[in-house]
Amino acid sequence: MKILMVASEAVPFAKTGGLADVAGVLPKFLKQLGHDVRVVMPLYGSIDQWKYRMEALPGAMGVWMGMIGELWCEVRQCMLPGSDVPIYFIVFDQYYARKGLYNEPNGAGFLDNDNRFVFLSRAALVLCKKIGFSPDVIHCNDWHTAAVPVFLNTVYAQDETLGQAASLLTIHNMEYQGRYYAGLMNVLDIGWEHFNHLELEWQNQCNLLKGGLYHATLFNAVSHGYAAEIQTPQFGHGLEGVVRDRRDALRGVLNGIDYEEWNPAHDKHITAPYDIDDMYGKSVCKHALQEELGLEPRSDVPLFGLVARLVDQKGIRLLAQIFEALMRLDIQIALLGSGEAWAEDFFRLMSYRYPEKFGCHIGYSNPLAHRIEAGSDFFLMPSVFEPCGLNQLYSLRYGTIPIVHAVGGLNDTIYNYDGYFHSGTGFKYYDQTPEALYNTIAWALELWTHQPSEIEGLRRRAMEQRFSWQGSAEQYVEIYKEAIFRKTGRSVID
């Protein structure tokens, strides 16, 4: 198959969340399965084009933007590092040469995000014609590229290059939908007849994700649990009815992780290697992490790690509510993250107040994230909702026992500890309340203190789990085949 992946971010070039991992890693595994896969994303100002040896495609490329007119851009290309998958970068400084991907430094979204990502969606299609690439399926991601299926079914429906292309829209986070003023229809330039309650209209706004959900050949969530949750008012954020109406086209595929990068046996970022049959290095990593963060270097106290964006979705407010109560327990906490100003200020204050028990690094550091996974005994993920989650998967591989809110991908991937059957890979709680989170942490502490053999069993079972991109890629291939058959009636034979 010929597959085009269109995304607003991809590792290692630009990342704010799990979308980047999918767009930057999944194509490599699709290529290994024998498919011709290409990736398209913006060239943000933060991307070092010289580092990745980008080359310019000859000639400028015109992209029609309705009432704005035709905008001309450049395209540069290189290979996804460690692969022979081409990745194309849309170069348009007016939209993309900024410090942030989506937001101002104060956290406010860029006022022209609607135009920025309509432009990306249409530019990806124009690029196919420029390079003579006729994809069998175009894989779009979130609201940023949800206009692609809309364009395919309207202005490109009879196009020689793109008219037969099926589409798959992956939902990484239903909360963000690309809701803008109704006049965005004049930029899309597909005809106002598509501004209706089934397609793009939502409370008199133009909702790009809604349009994508209506027009995509198939769509999927990044876990089976999240696929079920987005059909409910609690997690559907106003589009649950749209999802239910098209549930026959909805699929669930759990993200994988790259076990080449996330493997404690040869992780270049951690202090000492270890694996399931030789865990000595984990205690070395714990001691080194305690020293790095200024914590009291104790082997007898459990260290709880947390690496997250400091936003409400990640359950940070819940953790803040019980934080001082946690500091009265005989535990330590290591936190890495950045986000809302109140959260950054709060956790900085706590690190000054409890320097021997709480280590805090505001910001992001991939090497430190690895060291927290390796050096912690438990890993906290109190997310309000979590479409898939990756840190719990990293934690399993590193023998760091997850403590999670039982939602979405967290519920799908973590099996709750059962002392009677000596089973499970972590601890889950079901009510998103301060009491539930506190009691679950206290439960883990009690087991650590009084039943260390159970902790060892949990750790071993956790490290035996595997959630590879190979398996995810194979599932996506089957979905692509189904989408192509739905669109064209043509069966794809391996």
Image (tube, rainbow, N blue to C red):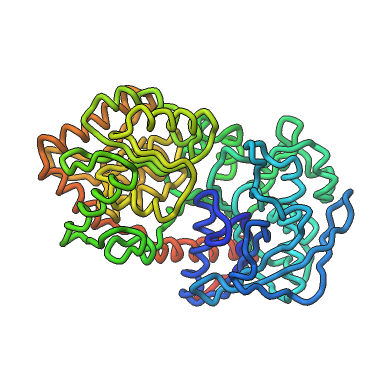
Residue 355 screen position, x and y as percent: 33, 33
Q: Is residue 5 visible?
A: yes
Which residue does the image show at 37% across and 41% down from the upper left? 306
Which residue does the image show at 78% across and 44% down from the upper left? 194
Q: Is residue 305 left or right of residue 203?
A: left
Residue 283 screen position, x and y as percent: 20, 52
The correct choice, above or below, for 228 with respect to 476 in the image is: above
Residue in front for this viewpoint, 318 or 134: 318
Residue 223 screen position, x and y as percent: 44, 48
Residue in front for this viewpoint, 88 or 254: 88
Residue 239, by quadrant, is top right
Which residue does the image show at 55% across and 48% down from the upper left? 171
The correct choice, above or below, for 191 with respect to 433 in the image is: below
Which residue does the image show at 50% across and 57% down from the upper left? 21
- Total labels: the figure holds 0
Residue 407 screen position, x and y as percent: 40, 38
Q: Is residue 137 visible?
A: no
Residue 183, by quadrant, is top right
Residue 44, by quadrant, is bottom right
Quadrant where the N terminus sits is bottom right
Residue in front for this viewpoint, 70 or 334: 334
The correct choice, above or below, for 39 with respect to 57 in the image is: above
